[in-house]
Amino acid sequence: MTLAELTAKMKEGASKKSSFGNTVKFATDQGVVYIDGNANPPDVSNDDKAADCTLRMDFSDFSDLIGGKLDGMTAFMTGKLKIEGDMGVAMKLQSILR
């Protein structure tokens, strides 16, 4: 999947969710996906803005995470996912991405 395809998939999923009160950015080697959880439903874009929590990972791992092939906790524990900013926001993502 390309970054545009993953962004579209995340946008579709977010359209069914409620706001969660934070901003999150997934930063990969192929670009970013920004989720504005202050909007209802959350807004998903490729804007590189400041966020409450930034998750850094390789694009292939990001694709696996969004595709359900990689668990977020496993990615974090094995060093594939690095979290900057508010760890509590990262913990909320588990339910938001499902």
Image (spheres, helix red, strand yellow):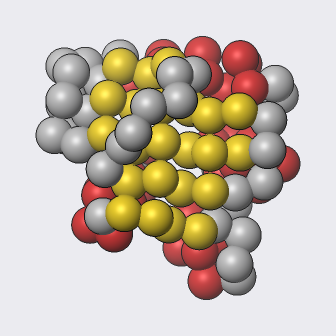
Instruction: Work out whether 71 lies above or below 52.
Output: below
Residue 91 visible in the shown view: no
Q: Residue at image x 62%, y 45%?
A: 27
Residue 50 visible in the shown view: yes
Kindly indicate the quadrant of the structure image that contains residue 8: top right
Q: Residue at image x 39%, y 39%?
A: 50
Instruction: Work out whether 36 lies above or below 82.
Output: above
Kindly indicate the quadrant of the structure image that contains residue 13: top left
Quarter the C terminus occupies: top left
Q: Position of residue 93 (x, y in %)?
A: 38, 52
Q: Position of residue 3 (x, y in %)?
A: 74, 26
Q: Position of residue 56 (x, y in %)?
A: 62, 57
Q: Residue at image x 59%, y 75%?
A: 76
Quarter the N terminus occupies: top right
- The residue lying furthest to the bottom in this view is 77
Choose between 73 and 85: the one closer to the eye.
85
Q: Is residue 82 left or right of residue 15?
A: right
Q: Is residue 25 left or right of residue 85?
A: right
Choose between 48 and 83: the one closer to the eye.
48
Choose between 51 and 45: the one closer to the eye.
51
